[in-house]
Image (cartoon, helix red, strand yellow):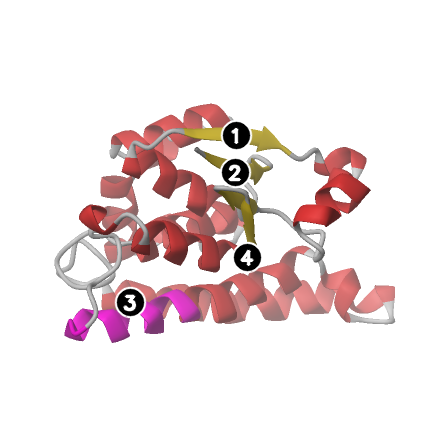
């Protein structure tokens, strides 16, 4: 049985979506960030980076959210959450997953934690403003990509869709949130109706009222 070390609405959300979509047995183990539990000796033994999430699969710990998403998708091939080797969509899967995690997620981290990216605390507000503009452009790119499409990669659901939904949840406080984009909004609202997404949001305390 899988164990997912998580904290609500953190980077563990995408793997949580996938576990629910797979309908496999798994245990949620809450890592209380409020008490800095991710830096505890016990947690660092599983994840030396001291970050959330960590997945334990048959005793093997795996960290980094996209790595966990890929692992779960590849070890459950009947789910079709990752295109098979040889499929033209496989390259696109990795392209978009890397864009989501290396570009959008990374930029969101600067937006949320500007104080970690400057030695002048007075500059934090400028960082936030600049990041908001950059991130809005990135969601605009995704909005164009999703025109006439139900899924980010090919014609079927993939792990990329769950990862994008997680990032969209994080970005809902922007002046122009993901739901304000026409194509992206329709796409997210369809995903929000999936049973797996509904179950995860209920467990993690996220209202889906805005997605109705």
Residue 206 visible to the viewer: no
Q: Answer yes or no: do the residues labelled 1 and 3 have beta carbons within 8 Å? A: no
The numbered disc on residue 28 is 1
Q: Label 1, label 4: how many angstroms apart (C-alpha)?
A: 16 Å
The total number of labels drawn is 4
Q: Earlier in the sequence, mark 2 or mark 4?
A: 2
Q: Earlier in the sequence, mark 2 or mark 1?
A: 2
- In the rendered structure, the answer to whether residue 7 lies left or right of residue 73 reads right
Viewer-proximal residue among 117 and 212: 117
Quarter holding the C terminus is: top left
Q: Residues within 10 Å of mark 1 (few under 14, many from 20)?
A: few
- Is 87 one of the magenta-colored residues? yes
Residue 197: x %, y % from top left: 34, 35
Q: Going 29% across and 63% down the picture, which residue do you hit?
A: 143
In terms of secondary structure, where does tag 1 sit? Answer: strand
The numbered disc on residue 100 is none
In terms of secondary structure, where does tag 3 sit? Answer: helix
Which callout, 4 or 3, points to the residue nearer the camera? 4
Q: Label 2, label 4: how many angstroms apart (C-alpha)?
A: 12 Å
Q: Earlier in the sequence, mark 1 or mark 4?
A: 1
In terms of secondary structure, where does tag 2 sit? Answer: strand
Q: Label 2, label 1: how many angstroms apart (C-alpha)?
A: 5 Å
Q: Label 3, label 2: how many angstroms apart (C-alpha)?
A: 23 Å
The numbered disc on residue 64 is 4
- In the rendered structure, the answer to whether residue 93 lies left or right of residue 105 reads left
Q: Going 66% across and 35% down the picture, which residue do you hit?
A: 31
> Main structural element of the magenta stretch: helix, strand or loop?
helix
Q: Going 57% across and 44% down the picture, which residue do you hit?
A: 10
* Pointer 3 residue: 93
* Pointer 2 residue: 4
Q: Earlier in the sequence, mark 1 or mark 3?
A: 1
Q: Earlier in the sequence, mark 3 or mark 2?
A: 2
């Amino acid at each position: 049985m899988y164990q997912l070390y998580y904290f609500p609405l953190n980077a563990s959300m995408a793997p949580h979506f996938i576990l629910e979509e797979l309908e496999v047995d798994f245990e949620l183990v809450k890592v209380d960030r409020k008490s800095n539990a991710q830096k505890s000796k016990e947690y660092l033994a599983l994840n030396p980076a001291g970050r959330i999430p960590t997945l334990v699969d048959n005793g093997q710990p795996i960290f980094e959210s996209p790595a966990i998403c890929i692992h779960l998708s590849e070890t459950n091939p009947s789910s079709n959450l990752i295109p098979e080797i040889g499929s033209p969509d496989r390259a696109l899967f990795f392209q978009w997953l890397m864009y989501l995690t290396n570009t959008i997620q990374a930029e969101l981290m600067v937006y949320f934690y500007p104080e970690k990216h400057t030695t002048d605390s007075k500059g934090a507000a400028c960082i936030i403003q600049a990041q908001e503009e950059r991130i809005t452009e990135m969601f605009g790119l995704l909005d164009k990509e999703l025109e006439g499409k139900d899924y980010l990669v090919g014609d079927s659901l993939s792990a990329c869709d769950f990862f994008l939904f997680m990032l969209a949840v994080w970005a809902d406080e922007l002046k122009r949130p993901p739901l304000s984009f026409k194509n992206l909004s329709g796409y997210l609202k369809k995903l929000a109706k999936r049973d797996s997404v509904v179950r995860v949001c209920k467990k993690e305390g996220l209202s889906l009222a805005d997605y109705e």
